[in-house]
Amino acid sequence: MDTNQTHSLLNAATDILGKKDGFRVWSVIVTLFGDLARNKDDQISGALLTHLMESMGIRPQATRVALHRLRKDEWISSQKFGRTVRYSLTETGFAQSLEARSRIYNVKPTAPENWHILIAQPMPQARRIALDQSYISKGYLNVSPGVLLGKGKLSENYSDFLGLEGDLKTIPNWLKSSCAPADITQGYDALCDDLAQFTKLLESHPTSSPHETAALRILIIHNWRRLLLRHADLPAEFYPDDWPGLMSRRLVMGLLDRLKRPPLPELQS
Amino acid sequence: MDTNQTHSLLNAATDILGKKDGFRVWSVIVTLFGDLARNKDDQISGALLTHLMESMGIRPQATRVALHRLRKDEWISSQKFGRTVRYSLTETGFAQSLEARSRIYNVKPTAPENWHILIAQPMPQARRIALDQSYISKGYLNVSPGVLLGKGKLSENYSDFLGLEGDLKTIPNWLKSSCAPADITQGYDALCDDLAQFTKLLESHPTSSPHETAALRILIIHNWRRLLLRHADLPAEFYPDDWPGLMSRRLVMGLLDRLKRPPLPELQS
């Protein structure tokens, strides 16, 4: 594949999938590490990082600033080897990356065998909202004020709640609507359009280089996870049948399957 | 047993257990039918009714008025045989009596194998209170606004709710307190005192006639059911350990076991 064609594919892809509102450079780097640094001690050279970021239209200076921030936040660490720098995820960074990965790359979220529900004591609204928020961040679905639905069995630590563990029997339409809030639905609608456009683009560029493939994967995954991680992780039956979040997942998984991840050593060499 | 002693036992018992605030004559008759008319077609003669009611200090005229009301409400029906009248429960009256009986005479309410919980859609308060009330009257426990706990498996008819069916894992203290509201707790406290006093009285009157026994049972059951049917039907673990409702049940069941129900034909003869 000649460089011109490669260049034009990445440029066109970046026009479609890059530079969205709210894209943060450090956040793109997080996506990059999530896709390429699969093992605990994987290192990515500064040169590869800068190259991949640049191919998505992000200037080296912006990448440097973002890397500095991520190092300060102890999300990544760096090691110098003569004139080259290598970055790797810290323990915290790797743990968080691993957790997000289980959602991002999940082809079909299946319902757990058990569910549990926690009912909080009636309390003043401000306190209740804070309580609900703290459980949402643990992955609970906030069904209604003070009512939290969680996956799996109930652990022993919830003696302040009425706790029931068992099978989910009915998921009403009002809950499905609340699991699919308007802003996220709009985001997925736009993503479906973008991915359809990108799929067409890919058809006229049947092959791509390892670096190009890596950059394309990062663009796709970044768009996907920005929406995905803003809502609860639930199986398909929690959403309206025609929800674009379900279609987005199918499109993303199809594209990632087609654009297989190049091995890190191959990219690094 | 001589009539004087019988008379003084019933008088003393009525002093303790009779004529409470809010005792309604028709309601005492409901208790009487519940205890004596165990089978669908059991008839109680007007003479026996009047006699038992009079022995609890209720005048024949008041009994007549109450019987008239219960007949008008189609709770009982009457049949004339020459100069005697016989009363029996209507189909509705018997069904309701049977339902209440399963609670009133239950020595130890046990937890069901399954529980289910219904979560209603967030809605305006007035509508939600009406919804909660309609489920409370079906025997649900209103855990918090729009959250209803029911016994047994979930039937298919609840598609407007999020429905979970399974095991109850934790019953928090705040729920135990709300299951034992202050006014009912006070009522049970007073009943415990009355029953202790009555038990002492009974010790000095070791035997009693069938009519006397029937009247004493009705006095006890009436006090008991007036409190019992004002709160949800739940096993002991839903209440604070020292709740007087649990002690009241033990005292009532002990007394009813001691004052065995006289057979209706024996009373009627």
Image (tube, coloured by chain):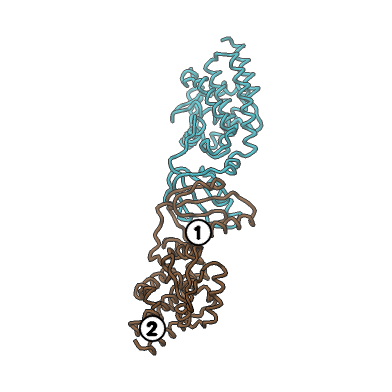
Chain colours: A cyan, B brown
| Quarter occupied by the N terminus of chain B | bottom left
Of callouts 1 and 2, the N-terminal one? 1
Disc 1 and disc 2 in contact, CB within 8 angstroms: no
Question: Does A64 sit above or below residue A129?
Answer: above
**Label 1 secondary element:** loop
State whether residue A226 appears in this view. no
| Callout 1 crowding tier (Cα within 10 Å): few <14, some 14–19, many ≥20 | some
Q: Position of residue B123 (x, y in %)?
A: 63, 51
Question: Does A144 sit above or below residue A66?
Answer: below
Q: Check residue B139 in the rendering and tell me which mark sits there, or answer none.
A: 1
Q: Both on one chain, marks 1 and 2?
A: yes
At 58% across and 38% down in the image, what residue appears? A230
At 37% across and 79% down in the image, what residue appears? B210
Name the amino acid type tagged 1.
Answer: Gly
Front-most of residues B174 and B133: B133
Q: Residue B207 vs residue A75: left or right? A: left
| Quarter occupied by the C terminus of chain B | bottom left
Question: Does B124 sit above or below residue B193?
Answer: above
State whether residue A232 appears in this view. yes
At 56% across and 43% down in the image, what residue appears? A172
Q: Position of residue B131 (x, y in %)?
A: 59, 55
Q: According to the image, label 2 marks what residue? A: B201
Front-most of residues B113 and A6: B113
Name the amino acid type tagged 2.
Answer: Leu
What subunit carries mark 1?
B
Determine which quarter of the picture holds residue A177. top right
Q: Position of residue B53 (x, y in %)?
A: 47, 79
Q: Position of residue B11 (x, y in %)?
A: 44, 85
Residues at marks 1 and 2, CA–CA distance in whole angstroms: 36 Å
| Callout 2 crowding tier (Cα within 10 Å): few <14, some 14–19, many ≥20 | some
